[in-house]
Amino acid sequence: MADMDQETANKMVIEALQKKQKTKSKFYFSDLQDILGLKPREAKKFVNKMVEAQILEFWSSGSTTMYGLKGTGKQAGAEHED
């Protein structure tokens, strides 16, 4: 599916993550790759653009990087505290 555009990729990822949001707020890159149905290199380009556009955000435990919709999850409130 190399002919996928960014808008289509955004819509696919947002819809899929919103459906799973009640049980899970952070996702591995492989989860996003599966949603997009693309090879890693192609999927990474779309995911990076979503992070740049602030649709998705990174979350890191130090050893693992995960992705979530911007402003969702348990960390969202704590990240804005002083």
Image: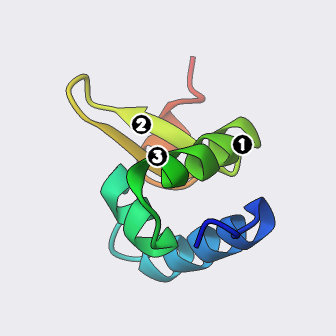
* Along the viewing direction, whichever of 50 and 46 lies nearer the viewer: 46
CB under 8 Å between callouts 1 and 2?
no
Q: CA distance from mark 3 to mark 1?
A: 20 Å
Q: Secondary structure at mark 3?
A: helix
Question: The N terminus appears in which quarter of the rendering?
Answer: bottom right
The image shows residue 27, relative to residue 60, as above or below, that is: below
CB under 8 Å between callouts 2 and 3?
no
- In the rendered image, the residue lying farthest to the bottom is 19
Is residue 36 found left or right of 71 in the rendered image? left
The residue labelled by disc 3 is: 41
Amino acid type assigned to the residue bearing label 3 in the image: Arg
Q: Is residue 42 visible?
A: yes
Could you tell me which residue is drawn at 60 percent across and 40 percent down? 48
Q: Earlier in the sequence, mark 3 or mark 1?
A: 3
Could you tell me which residue is drawn at 71 percent across and 36 percent down? 52
* Along the viewing direction, whichever of 76 and 14 lies nearer the viewer: 14
Amino acid type assigned to the residue bearing label 1 in the image: Gln
Q: Secondary structure at mark 1?
A: loop
Image coordinates for residue 76, horizontal then vertical, percent: 53, 43
Label 3 vs label 1, nearer the camera: 3
When asked about the image quadrant of residue 11, the answer is: bottom right
Mark drawn on residue 54: 1
